[in-house]
Image: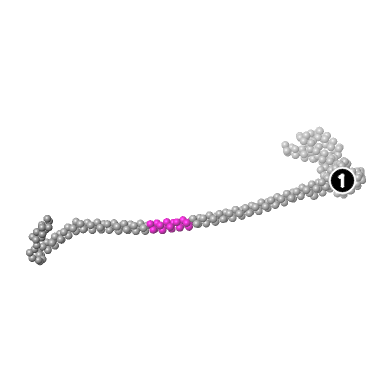
Amino acid sequence: MTLPIILAVAEASTPEKFGLELHVVLIQVVSFLILAGVLYYYAIRPVLSTMDERVKKIDSGLRYADEVKAKLEAVQHESEATAKKAQAEASKVIEEARKTAKEYLDRQSQETAAKTSEMLVKAQQVIELERRKMLAEARTEIARLVVATTERVLARELSEDDRGRYNASAARELSNT
Amino acid sequence: MASSAKVAQQFARQLVTLSLVDGSVSAERVGGVLAYLEKHAPANAIAVLKAYHRLIATEVAKGEAVVEHAGPVSEAELASIAAALSKHYRRTVTATARERPELIAGLRVHVGDDIYESSVAAQLAALEASV
């Protein structure tokens, strides 16, 4: 149905001669320029502007990401440095604690040794004093027993003549004094 | 109070000096001193008499030697001791014997506050002390 219509239109619009018609070309060029201008003004330029903004935003985002990355690396480096410093300080504190503990232990050992020596010396002195005291007491007791025994023996064994001779000797001694 | 006692002591010493004859206490002198005190009583007569009594007793003791002994002591030995003490103290000293068996043997002579001893007990005591 439509085919005869298309053929009739084609037959009716067929040019009479083959060639270039300048005014038609000009019209086509003008139409194209108008269309291009309208398209540029209402379509292409907003799109380009939008694309520029998008590009700027992307660039900004990339810079921000780079900055964040740099900051993150700086923070990471700083934290690593802080951790190293803290570790060094902890090691130093531990070393000082060990040194202090060793010094305290050495000092305690020396004090204990000194106290032990002092106690030994005092104990020896006490033992020596006790020994001397015991010897003195024994000597005194022996002397007392010897004297008491001698007194009893002399009181029993001395005769009146012996006492008389002793008294005579004592009288001479006192007279010559 | 203390000064009055000191004055009484000094006065008693003077009275004792008046009571001695050749370094020995004379009974006559003592009687004279007591008679004088009876007639001329000093202000602190009691204190003077007490001090005089004590000093006279000391002087009498100086003239008397108590010879403690264990065993027999002859009169000749007592006399020799009295003579030696009289010569030593430059006054007459009489010897009185007193038995003291704890001396074991020997003599111990008291003259006033002085003691002279030569006895077995003293030698044993010295031995015990030295040990």
Residue B100: x percent and y percent?
86, 41
Residue B37 shown left or right of residue A71 in the figure: right
Residue A75: x percent and y percent?
40, 56
Q: Is residue A162 magenta?
A: no
Quarter of the image where one finds residue B50: top right
Mark 1: few/some/many CA within 10 Å (<14, 14-19, 20+): few
**Secondary structure of residue under mark 1:** helix
Q: Is residue A82 magenta?
A: yes
Q: Which residue does the numbered mark 1 point to in the structure image?
A: A153
* Amino acid identity at mark 1: Val
Residue extending furthest toward the top: B39
Residue A6: x percent and y percent?
11, 58
Quarter of the image where one finds residue A11: bottom left
Residue B62: x percent and y percent?
84, 42
Q: Residue at x 50, y 57 (%)?
A: A91
Please tell me how many numbered marks the rendered image carries: 1
* Subunit ID for the residue under disc 1: A
Q: Check the picture and name the quadrant holding the N terminus of chain A.
A: bottom left
Please, is residue B16 above or below residue A54 in the view? above
Residue A94 shown left or right of residue B63 in the figure: left
- Extent of the magenta region: A72-89
Report the magenta stretch's main SS. Answer: helix
**Residue A128 versus residue B69: which sits nearer the camera?**
A128
Report if residue B81 is visible in the image.
no
Q: Residue at x 86, y 44 (%)?
A: A152
Please, is residue B55 above or below residue A76 in the view? above
